[in-house]
Image (spheres, helix red, strand yellow):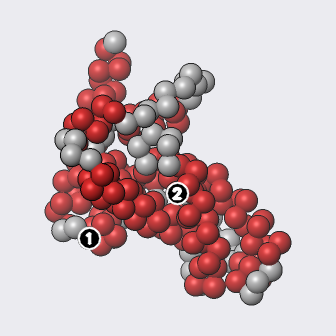
Amino acid sequence: MSLRPKSLPPSPPDPRVAKAAAGDRTCAEELLQELLPRVRNLVRYLAWGDVDVDDISQLALIEIARSFHNYRGEGALHSWAERITTRVALHHLRRRRAEERRRTSLSPAELHVLSPRNEQPDEYTLRRKTVRMLDDLPDDQRQALVMHHVVGLSVPELASELGIPFETARSRLRLGVQKLREQLRRRGSS
């Protein structure tokens, strides 16, 4: 099961990016509107539950808008935006975890039980099922899987982005895939 959308052939750089970087608000708004669904989906894959998705997505869009001048057009705009989104989301999630540790003396297991899950009735789409399965993974494995299979980072890039050794990145990917397969087997037998 691949979470990564099919690749499109390379296209010439969007001229709106240069205009947005030069201060054209209309072009910036158009680009951000186009990127919003991808940004939001990626954040949802990286963040546990729906609690912080809108906040993190907004922070990511702000950082993308601030960084239009850094886009060189060497790759797809959405790939560039996904990398920014990943960095913003991981930074936010690390900061939130540190704040939670400072505010409480509860164990991580107790925090997991007390965290809101916002389980709402849904249309049982593949995406929601996938997100639920990702929610059951430990943070480090979920983030590694999303960054590798959705964002498309190689294992060395993943290790560099997370600041971990290469073998640790490979291990997180392997363990995450194993746990997803176990979940699929359990769901298939129920």
Name the amino acid type tagged 2.
Ile
100 vs 134, nearest the viewer:
100
Q: Residue at x 26, y 53 (%)?
A: 101
Q: Nearer the viewer, mark 1 or mark 2?
A: 2
Above or below, 49 against 32 in this view is above
Can the viewer see residue 78?
A: no
Name the amino acid type tagged 1.
Gly
98 vs 82, nearest the viewer:
98
Q: Which residue is mark 1?
A: 163
Above or below, 14 against 41 in this view is below
Q: With 97 as the anchor, is 15 left or right in this view?
A: right
Residue 100, position as x, y percentages in the image:
32, 51
Above or below, 171 against 84 in this view is above
Residue 25, position as x, y percentages in the image:
80, 75
Q: Which residue is mark 2?
A: 56
Q: Quadrant of residue 13?
A: bottom right
115 vs 164, nearest the viewer:
115
- The circle drawn on residue 77 is none
**Separation of marks 1 and 2 at Cα, in angstroms:** 21 Å
Can the viewer see residue 101?
A: yes
Q: Earlier in the sequence, mark 1 or mark 2?
A: 2
Q: Residue at x 76, y 83 (%)?
A: 23
Q: Residue at x 30, y 52 (%)?
A: 103
Quick one: SS at disc 1?
loop
Residue 159, position as x, y percentages in the image:
27, 67
Mark 2 closeness class: few <14, some 14–19, many ≥20 residues within 10 Å? many
Above or below, 121 against 166 in this view is above
Q: Residue furthest right?
A: 26
Residue 162, position as x, y percentages in the image:
30, 66
Quick one: SS at disc 2?
helix
Q: Residue at x 56, y 64 (%)?
A: 59
